[in-house]
Amino acid sequence: MKLQLIKPKTAKPSLNISGKIALFLLIVFIGYFLRGIKIPEQFIFITDTLPEGPFSFQLQNRVILMLFLITVFFIAGKKYKDLFSVSPLKKKGTYIWIIGVMSLVILLMHQPLSFHLLPLQFGEYIQFFMIICIIVPIEEELFYRGLLLLIPYRKLQYVMLIISSLLFALIHSAGFSTLLLGLALGVLALRFRNLWVPILAHSLWNVFSMFF
């Protein structure tokens, strides 16, 4: 009769989970640090010529954070490659979802719409367009819908949907409408498990907000 030795259970998986949580929190902390740090003027190389006041984008902070997040996803490798697949953008149903969700946000805002032009020169319009339609959507979606929503465990996705949307609203002046927008973008991210979809929706929303 052979004796079978019972191997003692190790705490390796729990330590692994703890390590992942610690690493996740560290990346989030670094992200907020890069986004909010005040860079001395002598180290500012990326800026815009837009009028001061409402057009304050902290452009270099956004670019640095965007590059940091791209690096994080690149290091993560194949595990999250599907988040950057362009396949959803090739389907008509994706655009129906985007239009439907964004229209619902407009209805829930209960605000009258009126067309207006910003007091900007043509060159400033080009800058403004590139910032709010390219840089801002990519940077914010990588952080709020990517890092804070799609990266954590799926069991927490609805909790993280609320948390990420609240944090998204806190960095914008229009609190309630931005909360609705954050929830809408989060729903799109969860529906397609993809970041290009909320990036596109965010970009279209910013174009809409430029004139209405």
Image (tube, helix red, strand yellow):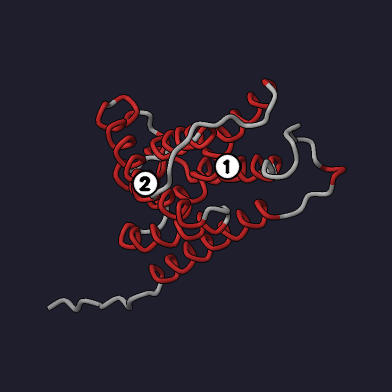
Q: Amino acid at mark 1?
A: Thr
Which quadrant would the N terminus be assigned to in this image?
A: bottom left
Compared with 203, 61 (above or below) is below
Please tell me which residue is depicted at 58% across the width and 54% down the height of the picture.
173
Identify the residue shown where x is 54% and y is 34%.
210
Residue 10, placed above or below residue 61 = below
In the rendered image, the vertical position of residue 156 relative to residue 193, given as above or below: below
**Number of numbered discs on residues:** 2
Instruction: Check disc 1 and report the residue beneath it.
Output: 71
Q: Is residue 212 left or right of residue 88?
A: right
- Residue 3 location (% of width, % of height): 19, 79
Quadrant of residue 112 within the rendered picture: top left
Q: Is residue 162 left or right of residue 168?
A: left
Q: Is residue 147 left or right of residue 106?
A: right
Q: Residue furthest right?
A: 42
Q: Residues within 10 Å of mark 2 (few under 14, many from 20)?
A: some
Residue under label 2:
105
Q: Of 49 and 63, which appears nearest the observer? A: 49
